[in-house]
Amino acid sequence: MSRKPEDLAATRRQIHQAMGGAERIEALHAAGRRTARDFIADFVDSDSFLELGTFAGMRQGAPTTVAGDGRIAGLATLDGHSIGVIVDDVTVKRASSTVLNARKAERVVGLAERRPGMPVLYIGEAGGARLPETLRGEVFASEPIYPWLFDEDRPPLVTAIVGESYGGSSFVATMSDITIMLEGSVLALTSPRVIQMATGANVSTEELGGAKVVASRTDLIDVVASDTRELDDVLRRALSFFTRPVIDSASRPQADLRALVPVEESKPYDVHGVIDAILDVDSFLELGALRGRSIVTGLGRVDGRVVGIVASQPIREAGAMSPEACSKAERMTRLCDRFNFPMLSLVDTPGFQVGVKAEHAGMMRSAMNLVKTNTAARSPVVTLVLRKAFGLSFFAMFSPDHGGDVVLAWPGAKIGFMAPSTAASVLYGDEVAALPAQEQKRRLTERAEALGASASALDVAAAMGIDEVVDECNTVATIRRYLEILAPKGVSS
């Protein structure tokens, strides 16, 4: 006998209201946290959520408290634009991973693939694989690890880790295009309890995978959100880059670049001011701010179109590129290349870090990987050398033969194999070694100035080592014109 419509509606209401049990909902609320359904209600457009798999796991005779199998999934709109939604529901068996709830995620991703550019939002806090079911060999061996994650053509994936994440949710976060983590959350392969049992080591969840620990020591997290308000704001901004790659309501900044960058090439400054002076007002979302800090990366907009940013940061290690900075820059290139977002490279670096520590940290491998990735990238790139670009770093930051479609430089910029001051010390250090310190400095400064003259932007431009020398006051307008040519608004990303 078929179920009456009113019975089905009542069951659905019970599932929505009770979830995995009133006491579990109350425990989340008492901790100041939202349930999975709270998040959906707060975040997406009102009444827009279309659920898939409401009754998953609710076999004949099972209580409604197991419905959904620890995951809520479906489609919705955000500011009028379609998105896929996957949210772990810790009120049901701690959102532990199963073949069934993996199937729910796969269904959402499959539907998103039907509409090009439609992103998928995943809110993760899974409690690892479900035990004891997964201990069965035939279950474990037949469960793929989210095969859609490894598809180069899968939809854009934005993930937020909002609780304790082990196993499946950590796998998804690792492979996402943009990953945000809420402070107080944990991201790890396995839990401290398993680590203690396996190794005897006692480690706290914060030490193992706290938000700032993970964001500063690994490349797994792009943004750390301090609270749910900031989390929702960052998620909206991140998703908008995919749902709206071009917008019409852009506001141009009115800053003077000349006032932001000191003339003296060794004097530090914060490149965020330069970025904000070029991008549309309040459009920049920095990614990876807590790691590789001699490089700034992120997404913003120029005249409404999404643009990726890779910029030297002179207030951190003088802008010298570390292995971590190279890895961060490479991640940004891959992100932009995957979605054909144009890029802007702002260069002001003395080169790569040198020394035993940098060498042993894989400096050479990181540098060459970055050059390789940038050279192979297909996204349009505009490069601007602000004050200096020495050594391999010039090529690693999108030179003409290594990914830079248009390479510009300011008139006073220096581009060459080595910083003139360093070259003078290498070439003439022995010659002046016996002189008093002040005289040594004076002689080496003179030598450096002579060497630096041949590294001027005009000399490099004369040999077509760069495409054009641009005056500071015309820089922003020039960049915007080139981006319009290379990535016109009318062409879909």
Image (spheres, helix red, strand yellow):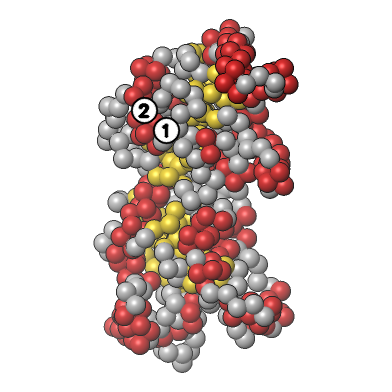
Asked if residue 223 can be seen in this view, the reply is yes
Quadrant for the N terminus, please: bottom left
The amino acid type found where label 1 is placed reads Tyr
Residue at image x 40%, y 83%? 20
Residue at image x 62%, y 86%? 132
Q: Are marks 2 and 1 in contact (CB under 8 Å)?
A: yes
Residue holding disc 2: 260
Badge 1 crowding class, 10 Å Cα cut-off, few under 14, some 14 to 19, many 20 or more, is some
Q: Where does residue 26 sit, x and y in percent of width and height? A: 32, 83
Q: Nearer the viewer, residue 147 or 421?
A: 421
Residue at image x 66%, y 23%? 425
Q: Nearer the viewer, residue 477 or 213?
A: 213
Query: N-terminal of the two: label 2 or label 1?
Result: 2
* Image quadrant where residue 356 sits: top right
Q: Where does residue 311 sit, x and y in percent of width and height? A: 49, 34
Residue holding disc 1: 269
